[in-house]
Image: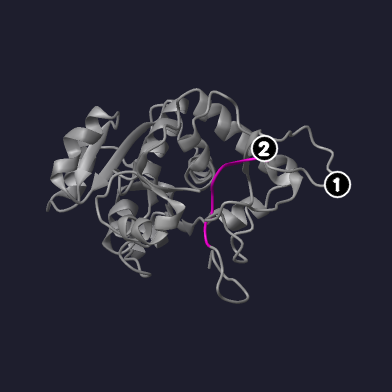
Amino acid sequence: PGFTPASLPAIPGLEGTGVVDKIGKGCTSSLTVGQRVVSYEWPSQSGNGTWRQYICVPEETLIAVPDSVTEEQAAMALINPVTVIGMVDILAAPAGEWLLTSAAGSALSRMVKDYAKLSGAKVMGTVRRKEQIAELLADGFDAVICTADSDVADQIKAATGGKSVYGALDSIGGASTKILTNATRNGGTVIVYGAMEGISFAGDVVDVLFRGVTIRGYWLVPHLRSLSVADRRATMEKVLKLCGEGLFPAYAGTVYDLKNVEKAVVEQAKAARGGKVLLRG
């Protein structure tokens, strides 16, 4: 749904950063040739994405990148950080309450941890491999649970001191959604934003019907389009500010030259590959 070109061949690529090469006639912004920029809406859905060397975009969608932000941070400033801010702000876990996120080893879940802690929330993650636990605890998660264990519910209760989590984020689906829903407080919310185990998820009627737990989705594109242009710009400016302050580090993996895009796609599909694969034009 995020890539629906009218015809093929088409160019994918949902995010990226570049340097202003030329400014069209009639442009009125303060951007200058040579300035680094990001966009809050690259025209990727129509097949005019960022996997290229040059692109023409409306000036009002561009935001200047501060010197304090690295090239890698800028290249990843749209999809994960804006999604993190959108979802964590929806859950609005107060200071001292727990937020639970699946796939804790992912770049996005690590950003969730960093951003949620700004408001004083505690963050617990789930993983599917025990060998990830020590590294994620060292990275700042307050608790990490392996879903391969038979006593996941007991471990979550033990970590929280017997409390339910305030809200949860799930990028996996399948059985993971039920685990997170069971762990969420009465009246809480579980946001499903991915489908790593397929397009179906498990749930519990008791959680939804009698405990009032809400299971809802989140997709970046309609979220951004629901905002005014001013709010879209403000969101990207907030992301860049937080990047410059070190909150959203670049969890970057292998960097490939654009001519080696096929190798990059193969690398991106590997499990436990590390950070996000980047292309450089």
Q: Amino acid at mark 2?
A: Ile
Q: Secondary structure at mark 1?
A: loop
**Residue topped by disc 1:** 25
Q: Which mark is residue 47?
A: none
Q: Position of residue 28 (x, y in %)?
A: 84, 38
Q: Residues within 10 Å of mark 2 (few under 14, many from 20)?
A: some
The amino acid type found where label 1 is placed reads: Lys
- Tell me if mark 1 has few (under 14), some (14-19) or many (20+) residues whose alpha carbon lies within 10 angstroms of its own: few
In the image, what residue occupies the spot 41% across and 28% down?
117
* As drawn, 95 above or below 277: above
| Residue at far bottom of view | 7
Asked whether 111 or 53 is in front, the reply is 53
Whether 147 is among the magenta residues is no
Horizontal side of 268 relative to 237 (left or right) equals left
Q: Residue at x 34, y 66 (%)?
A: 201
Tell me where residue 165 sits by quadrant.
top left
Going from N to C along the chain, the mark reached first, 1 or 2, is 1
Q: Is residue 101 left or right of residue 85?
A: left
Magenta region: which residues? Answer: 12-20
The answer to whether any part of residue 37 appears in the image is: yes
Residue 6 vs 87, above or below: the answer is below
Checking the image for residue 63, the label placed there is 2
Q: Which residue does the image show at 57% across and 27% down from the upper left? A: 241
Q: Residue at x 85, y 46 (%)?
A: 25
Mainly helix, strand or loop, the magenta region? loop
Per the model, the C-alpha gap separating discs 1 and 2 is: 19 Å
Residue 156 location in percent, x, y?
23, 42
Q: Is residue 161 visible?
A: no
Does the magenta portion include 18?
Answer: yes
- Does residue 162 sit above or below 222 in this rendering? above
Q: Where is residue 20 drawn, in percent x and y?
A: 67, 40
